[in-house]
Image (cartoon, grey):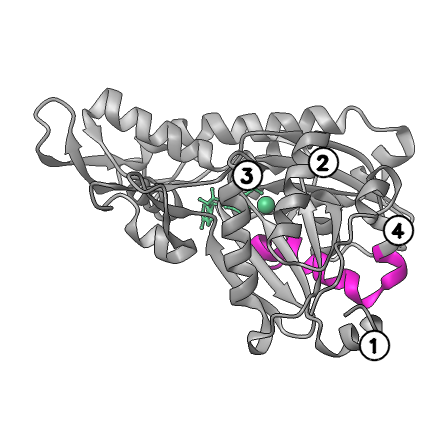
């Protein structure tokens, strides 16, 4: 069965780039771009422990699931919290993303947060292996995001990338195709949803679902003090005291300081990281400023906020949610670079190729 593997593999293999994020899993295939973008969620039947739905289908059940069904996120803060279920979810996504229903082995490049522990790294890799991916390369998320945001691998001067994900904020300083400095915090844009929900519960007596806070954040909240602080929107949920369905009016002026507390924390992390750089690197960043990637970069005015906080130019990458996966998929155009960026301390992972079986 192991005959002519390499030639066969070239013909039938999909080269997949996988960004397994806290909020979404995004898969791009070489030559086809993004082929899958679904929430990193599963719906579990609590009685049988069976997974009844994955991804978007599970998300659609969220908040209104049946009595025995719970919708769960198997990844927390960018890392595998529930190994068995992450593996199954990944296998589902990979199968869905494969071309022509081929069951043949493939190669994939995946990202991982920079401060991932050895145990977490292995869990992620095993999940990928057992999901039926042939050869898995792992690369640092910050580097992938940088390439995806347009940083060139041969650029000698340093670039700074702030990836604001759902569960992580990752700051990477990249030069000559490698990460020269990075910090990763296990909090991200989802924190905004949490503080909004807490505020509504404590101060307005309203319990709200995940869909409601997400909508409030993406369509009503901003990272700058709005001109009109009296603008209102209606938020619906469940009255904390009576338990009845209820609604409250909330203003932009009320929402702003809640959102700002989290954005400030993100900006502070960036500011701190930028004080830890060597002089030449600092000089490059002074000239160039920073690039924002990740879904959190889509919050209205977040670039403006960070710009005034760190006093440097701030830009948002094209397709910020896809920066990481776009960077990952670029690696297949340059095997030497792929080799380079997935080697070094990750050397162990290079030997993790599972036997090819047709
Ligand atoms: N228009 C928007 N405005 C504000 N926030 C947004 C918007 N769109 C998406 N987000 C937020 O971006 C986050 C998702 O970003 P992303 O897809 O980069 O995360 P992830 O890669 O899954 O997470 P992580 O990198 O932390 O593992 C969520 O918290 C989501 O609410
Ligand atoms: Mg991410």
Residue depth check, mark 2 versus mark 3: number of the one nearer the observer: 3
Mark closer to the chain start, 2 or 4: 2
- Structural distance between the alpha carbons of marks 2 and 3: 19 Å
The earlier-in-sequence mark between 1 and 4 is 1
Spatial separation of the CA atoms under disc 2 and disc 1: 34 Å
> Which residue does the image show at 72% across and 51% down from the upper left?
144
Which segment is the magenta one? 316-338
In this rendering, the answer to whether 337 lies above or below 286 is below
Quarter of the image where ligand 2 sits: top right
Q: Quadrant of residue 209?
A: top left
Asked if one can make out residue 187 in the rendered structure from this viewpoint, the answer is yes
Q: Which residue was labeled with disc 3? A: 83
Residue 169 percent location from the top left of the image: 60, 35
Report crowding for label 4: few under 14, some 14 to 19, many 20 or more residues within 10 A (C-alpha): few
Element class at badge 3: helix
Q: Secondary structure at mark 2?
A: loop
Front of the two marks 4 and 3 = 3
Which tag, 2 or 3, sits closer to the chain's start? Answer: 3
From the top left corner, tell me how far across and down residue 145 is, in percent. 69, 50
Image position of 43 (left or right of 202): right
Q: Are marks 2 and 1 in contact (CB under 8 Å)?
A: no
Residue depicted at 55% across the width and 67% down the height: 97
As drawn, is 80 to the left or to the right of 347?
Answer: left
Give 257 or 153, whichever is nearer the viewer.
Answer: 153
Dot 1 crowding, Cα within 10 Å, few <14, some 14–19, many 20+: few
Residue, disc 2:
114
Which percent across, then down, holds residue 103?
A: 61, 70
**Is disc 1 placed on a helix, strand or loop?**
helix
Labels 4 and 3: the sequence-earlier one:
3
Q: Is residue 224 visible?
A: no
């Amino acid at each position: 069965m192991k005959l002519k593997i390499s030639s066969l593999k070239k013909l039938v293999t999909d080269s997949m780039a996988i960004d397994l994020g806290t909020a979404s899993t995004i898969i791009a295939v070489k030559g086809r771009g993004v082929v899958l973008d679904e929430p990193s969620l599963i719906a579990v039947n609590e009685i049988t422990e069976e997974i009844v739905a994955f991804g978007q289908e599970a998300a659609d059940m969220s908040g209104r699931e049946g009595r025995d069904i719970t919708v769960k996120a198997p990844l927390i803060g960018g890392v595998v919290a529930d190994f068995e279920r992450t593996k199954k979810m990944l296998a589902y996504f990979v199968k869905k993303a494969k071309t022509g229903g081929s069951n043949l082995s493939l190669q994939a490049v995946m990202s991982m947060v920079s401060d991932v522990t050895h145990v977490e790294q292995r869990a992620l890799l095993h999940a990928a292996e057992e999901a039926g991916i042939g050869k898995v390369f792992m690369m640092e998320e910050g580097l992938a995001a940088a390439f995806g945001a347009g940083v060139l691998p041969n650029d000698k001067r340093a670039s700074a990338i702030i990836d604001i994900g759902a569960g992580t904020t990752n700051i990477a300083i990249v030069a000559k195709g490698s990460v020269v400095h990075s910090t990763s915090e296990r909090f991200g844009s989802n924190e905004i949803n949490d503080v909004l929900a807490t505020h509504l519960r404590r101060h307005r007596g309203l319990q709200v679902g995940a869909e409601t806070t997400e909508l409030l954040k993406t369509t009503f909240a901003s990272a700058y003090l709005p001109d009109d602080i009296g603008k209102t929107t209606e938020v619906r949920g469940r009255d904390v005291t009576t338990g009845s369905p209820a609604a409250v009016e909330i203003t932009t002026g009320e929402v702003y300081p809640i959102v700002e507390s989290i954005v400030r924390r993100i900006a502070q992390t960036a500011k701190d990281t930028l004080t830890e750089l060597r002089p030449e690197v600092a000089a490059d960043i002074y000239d160039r400023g920073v690039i924002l990637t990740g879904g959190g970069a889509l919050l209205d005015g977040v670039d403006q906020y960070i710009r005034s906080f760190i006093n440097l130019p701030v830009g948002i990458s094209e397709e910020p949610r896809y920066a990481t996966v776009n960077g990952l998929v670029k690696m297949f155009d340059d095997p030497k670079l792929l080799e380079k960026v997935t080697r070094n301390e990750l050397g162990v992972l290079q030997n993790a190729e599972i036997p090819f079986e047709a």
